[in-house]
């Protein structure tokens, strides 16, 4: 005989109040899980989609990020003299030398000196727009070389004091006017301030660059560059694709956010599991005679056990659907956190990906089934004669 699925589905709707409370409990657990997982997904997508595969970034060989890297002028010149670097129609190298640093600025609306955040500052040149075409100036214009003008990422506008078109950013020793707003399609550059590299080197009292970024004439030429500098004492640097570099930056924080998501969800899941269990146990107490009838009609204990587990699974799936419904308004909402690789502000958006939805539904189903194990085995163990006398 087949499992009496219709009977178990109908039982959920007969006991609407208990079912509803359990669905809400599981739903809020799933909502918390989706909230933090979408935060991690948004952060990872923001960085992993930044950069190009045919751009190569040179860093000091022991550096893990631009913030730790130091490349002298002589080494930068040698790097730009390597074969395989593309040129623009005028014959100029598609290359830029960058300085990367962090500065603490006040958040918009907070008292001076309180509520500060570390913001990434990139000293570069207007050629950066040719090397990194993902970046565009959406408002205003690019800074002029040799001046103290800056452009700011869209993610910082109205969030950090002075980060708006026509505003001015306090670099402590001087204020620099904001002449443009840059956008990078939600990439990491949306959280940066850009200015002339030579001016920024004076501001931060640096004598060296942080990185050199070049466009490859052949997208497959990265391996040739690696072979060319390997073992050459003139090149104490390493090279990797720009996209691979930014993907590396997501590692630690992305992992921490995922662990946090499951930790918080696990704590809340304890209550949801007991709620599901109590709902099914209470249901079992009121359905003892019905179960006895099913057993006398020829249904085996395995059928009863499987039916209760299906009932528990449906409870979990309904809770998962409710949790996903609650999380819909979060998708695309602006968010920000500290990038642990650089310890600077990173702006991005909550992103509910298919992977996040799958994890949420699987987790909800797991909660439901876990809560249904005890009632299922109890129901299957009922002797038919005792059940009918109940």
Image: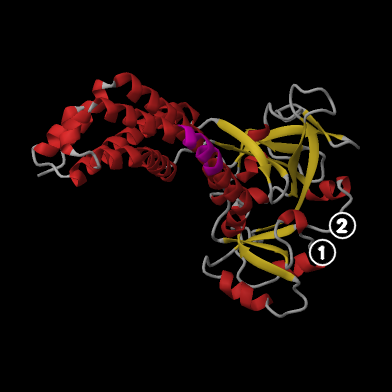
Q: Residue at x 62, y 64 (%)?
A: 240
Q: Position of residue 34 (x, y in %)?
A: 48, 37
Between the C-alphas of marks 2 and 1, the distance is 7 Å
The main secondary structure of the magenta stretch is helix
Q: Residue at x 58, y 50 (%)?
A: 255
Q: Is residue 198 left or right of residue 48?
A: right
Q: Is residue 268 magenta?
A: yes
Can I make out residue 17 in this image?
yes
The local crowd at label 1, few if under 14, some if 14 to 19, many if 20 or more residues have their Cα within 10 Å, is few
Question: Contact (CB < 8 A) between labels 2 and 1?
Answer: yes
The local crowd at label 2, few if under 14, some if 14 to 19, many if 20 or more residues have their Cα within 10 Å, is few
Work out which residue is located at the far right of the displayed protein and give it. Answer: 173
Work out which residue is located at the far bottom of the displayed protein and give it. Answer: 231
Q: Position of residue 38 (x, y in %)?
A: 51, 39
Q: Position of residue 254 (x, y in %)?
A: 58, 48
Q: Position of residue 142 (x, y in %)?
A: 69, 39
Q: Is residue 178 left or right of residue 190?
A: right
Q: Earlier in the sequence, mark 2 or mark 1?
A: 1
Work out which residue is located at the far top of the displayed protein and give it. Answer: 17
Within the image, what quadrant is residue 91 found in? bottom right
Q: Please, is residue 126 above or below residue 84 in the view? A: above
Which residue corresponds to mark 2?
Answer: 207
Label 2: which secondary element: loop
Which range of residues does the magenta coloring cover?
A: 262-271
Residue situated in front as seen by the camera: 11 or 224: 11
The quarter in which the C terminus is drawn is top left
């Amino acid at each position: 005989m087949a499992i009496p699925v219709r009977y178990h589905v109908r039982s959920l709707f007969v006991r609407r109040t208990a079912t509803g409370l359990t669905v809400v409990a599981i739903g809020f657990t799933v909502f918390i899980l989706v909230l933090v997982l979408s935060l991690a997904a948004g952060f990872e997508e923001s960085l992993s989609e930044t950069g190009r595969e045919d751009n190569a970034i040179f860093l000091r060989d022991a550096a893990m990020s631009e913030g730790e890297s130091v490349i002298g002028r002589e080494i930068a010149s040698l790097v730009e003299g390597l074969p395989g670097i593309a040129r623009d129609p005028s014959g100029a190298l598609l290359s830029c030398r960058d300085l990367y640093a962090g500065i603490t600025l006040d958040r918009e609306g907070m008292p001076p000196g309180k509520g500060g955040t570390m913001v990434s500052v990139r000293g570069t040149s207007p050629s950066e727009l040719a090397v990194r075409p993902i970046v565009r100036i959406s408002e205003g214009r690019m800074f002029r070389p040799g001046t103290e003008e800056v452009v700011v990422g869209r993610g910082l506008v109205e969030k950090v004091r002075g980060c708006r078109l026509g505003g001015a950013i306090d670099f402590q020793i001087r204020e620099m006017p904001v002449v443009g707003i840059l956008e990078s399609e939600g990439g990491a550059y949306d959280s940066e301030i850009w200015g002339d590299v030579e001016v920024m080197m004076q501001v931060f009292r640096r004598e060296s660059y942080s990185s050199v970024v070049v466009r490859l004439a052949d997208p497959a030429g990265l391996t040739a560059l690696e072979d060319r500098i390997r073992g050459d004492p003139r090149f104490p640097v390493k090279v990797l694709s720009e996209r691979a570099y930014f993907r590396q930056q997501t590692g630690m924080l992305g992992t921490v956010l995922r662990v946090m998501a499951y930790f918080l969800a696990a704590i809340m899941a304890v209550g949801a599991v007991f709620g599901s269990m109590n709902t099914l146990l209470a249901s079992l107490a009121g359905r003892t005679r019905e179960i006895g009838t099913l057993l006398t009609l020829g249904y085996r204990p395995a059928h009863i056990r499987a039916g209760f587990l299906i009932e528990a699974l449906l409870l979990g799936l309904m809770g998962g659907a409710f949790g996903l419904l609650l999380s819909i308004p979060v998708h695309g909402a602006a968010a920000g956190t500290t990038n642990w690789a650089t310890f600077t502000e990173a702006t991005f958006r909550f992103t509910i990906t298919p992977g996040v939805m799958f994890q949420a539904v699987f987790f909800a189903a797991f909660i439901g089934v876990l809560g249904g194990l005890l009632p299922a085995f109890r129901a299957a163990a009922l002797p038919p004669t005792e059940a009918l006398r109940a």
